[in-house]
Image (tube, grey):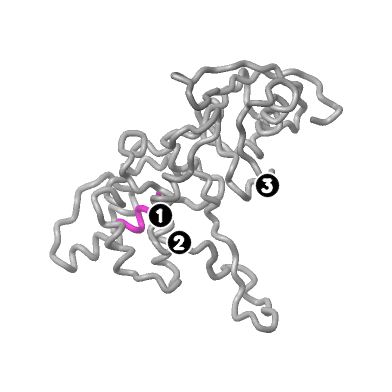
Amino acid sequence: MTDDAVTTRRLRVHRFKRGDHQPHIEEHDVPVDERTTVLEALRWIQLHQDLTLGLRHSCFHASCGTCGVRVNGKERLACVTKLSDISGTVTVDPLANLPVLHDVVVDMGPFVARYPEPHPIVRGSEFLSESRTADGIDEHERYEDCIECGLCLSACPVAATDDTYLGPAALAYAQRLLEEARGADRDAILDWADQDTGAWRCHAAFECTEACPSDVRPAQRIMALRKELRHRRKDRDLEVPERPSSASEASA
Protein backbone atom coordinates (compact mmCIF):
# COMPACT_ATOMS: atom_id res chain seq x y z
CA MET A 1 0.00 0.00 0.00
CA THR A 2 1.39 3.42 -0.90
CA ASP A 3 1.73 6.35 1.55
CA ASP A 4 -0.89 8.47 -0.25
CA ALA A 5 -3.87 6.32 0.76
CA VAL A 6 -6.80 8.70 1.05
CA THR A 7 -9.85 6.58 1.66
CA THR A 8 -11.19 3.27 2.92
CA ARG A 9 -13.03 0.65 0.91
CA ARG A 10 -15.04 -2.27 2.24
CA LEU A 11 -14.33 -5.70 0.78
CA ARG A 12 -16.64 -8.68 1.22
CA VAL A 13 -14.48 -11.77 0.83
CA HIS A 14 -15.60 -15.36 0.30
CA ARG A 15 -14.20 -17.61 3.02
CA PHE A 16 -14.09 -21.37 3.01
CA LYS A 17 -11.70 -23.82 4.59
CA ARG A 18 -11.46 -27.56 4.44
CA GLY A 19 -13.91 -29.02 6.93
CA ASP A 20 -16.33 -26.09 6.74
CA HIS A 21 -19.93 -27.12 6.06
CA GLN A 22 -20.71 -23.92 4.17
CA PRO A 23 -18.74 -20.94 2.85
CA HIS A 24 -19.39 -17.53 4.37
CA ILE A 25 -18.57 -13.88 3.69
CA GLU A 26 -16.25 -11.77 5.86
CA GLU A 27 -16.06 -7.99 5.56
CA HIS A 28 -12.86 -5.96 5.81
CA ASP A 29 -12.21 -2.21 5.61
CA VAL A 30 -9.03 -1.57 3.64
CA PRO A 31 -7.06 1.68 3.13
CA VAL A 32 -6.70 2.37 -0.59
CA ASP A 33 -5.58 4.95 -3.11
CA GLU A 34 -6.35 5.41 -6.80
CA ARG A 35 -3.91 2.70 -7.82
CA THR A 36 -4.82 -0.03 -5.33
CA THR A 37 -5.78 -3.28 -7.02
CA VAL A 38 -8.05 -6.00 -5.72
CA LEU A 39 -5.01 -8.22 -5.22
CA GLU A 40 -3.21 -5.55 -3.20
CA ALA A 41 -6.30 -5.10 -1.03
CA LEU A 42 -6.54 -8.84 -0.42
CA ARG A 43 -2.85 -8.97 0.45
CA TRP A 44 -3.34 -6.07 2.89
CA ILE A 45 -6.10 -8.06 4.60
CA GLN A 46 -3.82 -11.07 4.74
CA LEU A 47 -0.90 -9.10 6.19
CA HIS A 48 -2.78 -6.86 8.61
CA GLN A 49 -6.04 -8.53 9.57
CA ASP A 50 -6.14 -12.25 8.84
CA LEU A 51 -3.07 -14.32 8.02
CA THR A 52 -5.27 -17.31 7.20
CA LEU A 53 -6.80 -15.68 4.10
CA GLY A 54 -6.03 -17.97 1.18
CA LEU A 55 -4.81 -16.30 -2.05
CA ARG A 56 -3.04 -17.37 -5.21
CA HIS A 57 -0.86 -14.91 -7.12
CA SER A 58 2.51 -14.61 -8.79
CA CYS A 59 3.46 -12.09 -11.50
CA PHE A 60 1.38 -8.99 -10.54
CA HIS A 61 1.04 -7.93 -14.21
CA ALA A 62 -1.56 -10.22 -15.88
CA SER A 63 0.93 -12.70 -17.30
CA CYS A 64 0.63 -15.75 -15.07
CA GLY A 65 -3.16 -16.01 -14.75
CA THR A 66 -3.01 -17.29 -11.20
CA CYS A 67 -5.02 -14.53 -9.45
CA GLY A 68 -8.34 -15.01 -11.25
CA VAL A 69 -11.38 -14.26 -9.09
CA ARG A 70 -14.88 -12.91 -9.46
CA VAL A 71 -15.26 -9.27 -8.47
CA ASN A 72 -18.88 -8.25 -7.94
CA GLY A 73 -19.87 -11.26 -10.03
CA LYS A 74 -17.52 -10.58 -12.96
CA GLU A 75 -14.42 -12.62 -13.79
CA ARG A 76 -11.27 -10.55 -13.31
CA LEU A 77 -7.53 -10.86 -12.76
CA ALA A 78 -7.16 -9.37 -9.28
CA CYS A 79 -3.68 -7.99 -10.02
CA VAL A 80 -4.87 -5.54 -12.69
CA THR A 81 -8.35 -4.72 -11.38
CA LYS A 82 -8.29 -1.34 -9.66
CA LEU A 83 -10.71 -0.69 -6.83
CA SER A 84 -11.10 2.87 -8.10
CA ASP A 85 -12.80 1.44 -11.20
CA ILE A 86 -15.46 -0.29 -9.06
CA SER A 87 -18.19 1.58 -7.23
CA GLY A 88 -19.63 0.64 -3.86
CA THR A 89 -18.85 -2.42 -1.80
CA VAL A 90 -16.55 -4.89 -3.49
CA THR A 91 -17.37 -8.58 -3.21
CA VAL A 92 -14.60 -11.05 -4.06
CA ASP A 93 -15.53 -14.65 -4.82
CA PRO A 94 -13.55 -17.58 -6.22
CA LEU A 95 -13.93 -18.54 -9.86
CA ALA A 96 -17.08 -20.50 -10.63
CA ASN A 97 -17.34 -23.99 -12.16
CA LEU A 98 -14.20 -25.22 -10.38
CA PRO A 99 -13.86 -26.80 -6.89
CA VAL A 100 -12.97 -24.31 -4.15
CA LEU A 101 -9.92 -25.35 -2.16
CA HIS A 102 -9.53 -22.45 0.25
CA ASP A 103 -11.25 -19.04 0.39
CA VAL A 104 -10.78 -17.62 -3.15
CA VAL A 105 -8.41 -20.35 -4.34
CA VAL A 106 -9.82 -22.97 -6.72
CA ASP A 107 -8.51 -26.33 -7.89
CA MET A 108 -7.24 -25.81 -11.46
CA GLY A 109 -6.86 -29.55 -12.00
CA PRO A 110 -10.27 -30.01 -13.68
CA PHE A 111 -9.51 -27.00 -15.92
CA VAL A 112 -6.20 -28.43 -17.17
CA ALA A 113 -7.70 -31.93 -17.52
CA ARG A 114 -10.07 -30.63 -20.21
CA TYR A 115 -7.24 -30.01 -22.69
CA PRO A 116 -6.46 -32.48 -25.46
CA GLU A 117 -3.04 -34.07 -25.67
CA PRO A 118 -0.43 -32.97 -26.55
CA HIS A 119 -0.53 -29.59 -24.84
CA PRO A 120 2.47 -27.47 -25.93
CA ILE A 121 2.90 -24.05 -24.33
CA VAL A 122 4.84 -22.34 -27.13
CA ARG A 123 4.15 -21.73 -30.79
CA GLY A 124 5.65 -19.88 -33.74
CA SER A 125 5.75 -16.12 -33.22
CA GLU A 126 3.49 -13.82 -35.26
CA PHE A 127 5.81 -10.92 -34.54
CA LEU A 128 9.30 -9.85 -35.45
CA SER A 129 8.84 -11.14 -39.00
CA GLU A 130 11.68 -8.97 -40.28
CA SER A 131 14.04 -9.65 -37.42
CA ARG A 132 16.89 -12.10 -37.52
CA THR A 133 17.08 -15.04 -35.20
CA ALA A 134 20.20 -15.75 -33.22
CA ASP A 135 22.65 -18.35 -34.40
CA GLY A 136 21.34 -21.83 -33.76
CA ILE A 137 17.66 -20.73 -33.56
CA ASP A 138 15.41 -21.53 -36.54
CA GLU A 139 12.51 -19.26 -35.60
CA HIS A 140 11.21 -17.09 -32.82
CA GLU A 141 8.79 -18.62 -30.37
CA ARG A 142 6.57 -17.10 -27.77
CA TYR A 143 4.28 -18.31 -25.05
CA GLU A 144 0.64 -18.85 -25.91
CA ASP A 145 -1.69 -15.88 -25.70
CA CYS A 146 -3.85 -17.96 -23.38
CA ILE A 147 -2.56 -17.63 -19.83
CA GLU A 148 -4.82 -20.45 -18.62
CA CYS A 149 -6.37 -18.29 -15.93
CA GLY A 150 -9.73 -20.11 -16.05
CA LEU A 151 -11.79 -16.91 -16.30
CA CYS A 152 -13.50 -18.15 -19.48
CA LEU A 153 -14.57 -21.39 -17.86
CA SER A 154 -15.89 -19.52 -14.83
CA ALA A 155 -17.98 -17.23 -17.07
CA CYS A 156 -19.30 -20.07 -19.26
CA PRO A 157 -23.05 -20.70 -18.71
CA VAL A 158 -22.77 -24.22 -20.16
CA ALA A 159 -19.99 -25.24 -17.75
CA ALA A 160 -22.22 -24.03 -14.92
CA THR A 161 -24.71 -26.82 -15.66
CA ASP A 162 -22.54 -29.47 -17.31
CA ASP A 163 -19.15 -30.35 -15.83
CA THR A 164 -18.46 -32.73 -18.73
CA TYR A 165 -18.29 -29.81 -21.20
CA LEU A 166 -14.74 -29.43 -22.50
CA GLY A 167 -15.01 -25.68 -22.10
CA PRO A 168 -13.87 -22.58 -23.98
CA ALA A 169 -10.15 -22.61 -23.14
CA ALA A 170 -9.56 -26.20 -24.25
CA LEU A 171 -11.66 -25.83 -27.41
CA ALA A 172 -9.94 -22.56 -28.33
CA TYR A 173 -6.64 -24.33 -27.86
CA ALA A 174 -7.77 -27.09 -30.25
CA GLN A 175 -8.65 -24.49 -32.87
CA ARG A 176 -5.20 -22.94 -32.53
CA LEU A 177 -3.69 -26.36 -33.11
CA LEU A 178 -5.61 -26.54 -36.39
CA GLU A 179 -4.49 -23.05 -37.39
CA GLU A 180 -0.84 -23.77 -36.84
CA ALA A 181 0.90 -27.05 -37.40
CA ARG A 182 2.76 -28.25 -34.33
CA GLY A 183 3.00 -31.88 -35.20
CA ALA A 184 -0.44 -32.57 -33.76
CA ASP A 185 -2.69 -35.16 -35.39
CA ARG A 186 -5.31 -32.99 -37.13
CA ASP A 187 -7.94 -35.72 -37.40
CA ALA A 188 -7.44 -36.66 -33.76
CA ILE A 189 -8.01 -33.04 -32.72
CA LEU A 190 -11.18 -32.81 -34.82
CA ASP A 191 -12.44 -36.14 -33.46
CA TRP A 192 -11.82 -34.84 -29.93
CA ALA A 193 -13.71 -31.58 -30.63
CA ASP A 194 -16.59 -33.36 -32.43
CA GLN A 195 -17.86 -35.19 -29.35
CA ASP A 196 -21.18 -34.30 -27.69
CA THR A 197 -19.38 -32.49 -24.86
CA GLY A 198 -17.15 -30.59 -27.30
CA ALA A 199 -17.68 -27.76 -29.77
CA TRP A 200 -21.35 -28.56 -30.41
CA ARG A 201 -22.16 -28.09 -26.69
CA CYS A 202 -21.36 -24.35 -26.82
CA HIS A 203 -24.42 -22.07 -26.65
CA ALA A 204 -22.64 -19.15 -28.35
CA ALA A 205 -23.23 -16.85 -25.40
CA PHE A 206 -19.75 -15.29 -25.89
CA GLU A 207 -19.39 -14.78 -22.12
CA CYS A 208 -15.97 -16.45 -22.36
CA THR A 209 -14.67 -13.89 -24.84
CA GLU A 210 -16.02 -11.11 -22.64
CA ALA A 211 -14.12 -12.50 -19.65
CA CYS A 212 -10.83 -13.32 -21.39
CA PRO A 213 -8.02 -10.93 -20.32
CA SER A 214 -5.66 -12.02 -23.13
CA ASP A 215 -7.77 -11.47 -26.26
CA VAL A 216 -7.80 -15.17 -27.07
CA ARG A 217 -11.45 -14.81 -28.20
CA PRO A 218 -12.39 -18.38 -27.26
CA ALA A 219 -16.00 -18.09 -28.46
CA GLN A 220 -14.93 -16.99 -31.94
CA ARG A 221 -12.45 -19.86 -32.04
CA ILE A 222 -15.16 -22.33 -31.06
CA MET A 223 -17.34 -20.98 -33.88
CA ALA A 224 -14.42 -21.44 -36.31
CA LEU A 225 -13.93 -24.95 -35.01
CA ARG A 226 -17.60 -25.78 -35.54
CA LYS A 227 -17.42 -24.38 -39.07
CA GLU A 228 -14.61 -26.80 -39.83
CA LEU A 229 -16.46 -29.67 -38.16
CA ARG A 230 -19.59 -28.86 -40.14
CA HIS A 231 -17.73 -29.11 -43.47
CA ARG A 232 -16.06 -32.31 -42.34
CA ARG A 233 -19.37 -33.90 -41.40
CA LYS A 234 -20.96 -32.88 -44.71
CA ASP A 235 -18.03 -34.36 -46.62
CA ARG A 236 -18.63 -37.60 -44.75
CA ASP A 237 -22.45 -37.49 -45.24
CA LEU A 238 -22.92 -37.23 -41.50
CA GLU A 239 -25.68 -35.31 -39.73
CA VAL A 240 -24.71 -31.80 -38.64
CA PRO A 241 -26.02 -30.98 -35.14
CA GLU A 242 -28.26 -27.91 -34.89
CA ARG A 243 -26.76 -25.55 -32.36
CA PRO A 244 -26.92 -21.82 -31.56
CA SER A 245 -24.41 -20.02 -33.74
CA SER A 246 -22.81 -16.66 -34.37
CA ALA A 247 -23.66 -14.65 -37.50
CA SER A 248 -20.35 -15.58 -39.13
CA GLU A 249 -20.88 -19.27 -38.44
CA ALA A 250 -24.45 -19.21 -39.75
CA SER A 251 -23.28 -17.76 -43.07
CA ALA A 252 -20.64 -20.46 -43.53
Residue ranking furthest to the bottom: 135
- The residue at the point 13 percent across, 65 percent down is 237
* Coordinates of residue 31 in the picture (x, y in percent): 76, 21
| Pointer 2 local density, CA inside 10 Å: few below 14, some 14–19, many at least 20 | few
| Pointer 3 local density, CA inside 10 Å: few below 14, some 14–19, many at least 20 | few
Q: Is residue 154 left or right of residue 3?
A: left
Q: For the residue marked with disc 2, what is the amino acid?
A: His
- State if disc 1 and disc 3 touch (CB < 8 Å): no
- State if disc 2 and disc 1 touch (CB < 8 Å): yes
Q: For the residue marked with disc 1, what is the amino acid?
A: Tyr
Task: Report the residue marked by disc 1.
Answer: 115
Give the spatial CA distance, label 1 vs label 2: 7 Å
For the N terminus, give its image quadrant: top right
Residue ranking furthest to the front: 19
Q: For the residue marked with disc 3, what is the amino acid?
A: Cys
Q: Is residue 176 left or right of residue 1?
A: left
Task: Report the residue marked by disc 3.
Answer: 59
Q: Which residues are magenta?
A: 219-226
* Coordinates of residue 233 in the picture (x, y in percent): 20, 63
Residue 221: in magenta span: yes
- The residue at the point 77 percent across, 19 percent down is 7
Sequence-first tag of 2 and 3: 3
Element under label 1?
A: loop
Task: Report the residue marked by disc 2.
Answer: 119
Element under label 3?
A: loop
Give the spatial CA distance, label 2 vs label 3: 22 Å
